[in-house]
Amino acid sequence: EYGIPDEILTDHGTQFVAAKSREKARHRFREFLAENGVRHILARVNHPQTNGKIERFFGLMEQKLHLFDSLDEFIYWYNYVKPHMSLNFDELETPYQAFLRKLPAERVFEYGRWLFEE
């Protein structure tokens, strides 16, 4: 639905990197990335903070998904309803609100016009 990304961040798991000679070994995942022009960024070894945000997201998803009728409903809740501590938590800011706050004013006004077009 969203296409192939420009880059991807992974840990050093064998599902992402061949076990032998990590840089030179033939590995289908690495071949796919090369064929599609995707930059592969490897997380630092023994540095869980690198992938911490996504690991926390998946943990929360496993914990809460049963409360929703679909994955789309969970994602809506996560982005539009649930305040995130890493954002402006004092204002109970959601990722969507942070996204709008960080947009240049001209982009916000363009977006606002789009909402009201017929």
Image: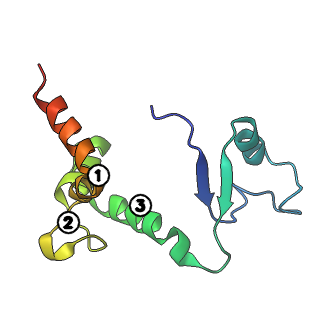
Give coordinates of residue 18: x percent, y percent: 80, 57
Sooner in the amino-acid sequence: mark 3 or mark 2: 3
Q: Is residue 73 visible?
A: no
Sooner in the amino-acid sequence: mark 1 or mark 3: 3
Residue corresponding to mark 3 = 58
Q: Tell me the quarter of the picture where residue 86 sits.
A: bottom left
Kindly identify which numbered label has been placed on residue 83. 2
Sooner in the amino-acid sequence: mark 1 or mark 2: 2
Q: In the displayed structure, does residue 105 sit left or right of residue 60? A: left
Q: Nearer the viewer, mark 1 or mark 3?
A: 1
Q: Is residue 51 above or below residue 38?
A: below
Q: In the displayed structure, does residue 7 sit left or right of residue 34? A: left
Identity of the residue drawn at 84% across and 59% down: 23
Kindly identify which numbered label has been placed on residue 49. none
Dot 1 falls on a residue whose secondary structure is: loop
Tags 1 and 2 touching, CB below 8 Å = no
Q: Is residue 110 visible?
A: yes
Residue nearest the observer in this picture, 104 or 94: 104
Q: Residues within 10 Å of mark 3 (few under 14, many from 20)?
A: few
Separation of residues labelled 1 and 3 (CA atoms): 27 Å
Q: In the displayed structure, does residue 73 sit left or right of residue 16? A: left
Residue type indicated by callout 1: Leu
Identity of the residue drawn at 41% across and 61% down: 58
Residue extending furthest toward the top: 118
Q: Tell me the quarter of the picture where residue 78 sits.
A: bottom left
Residue corresponding to mark 1 = 103
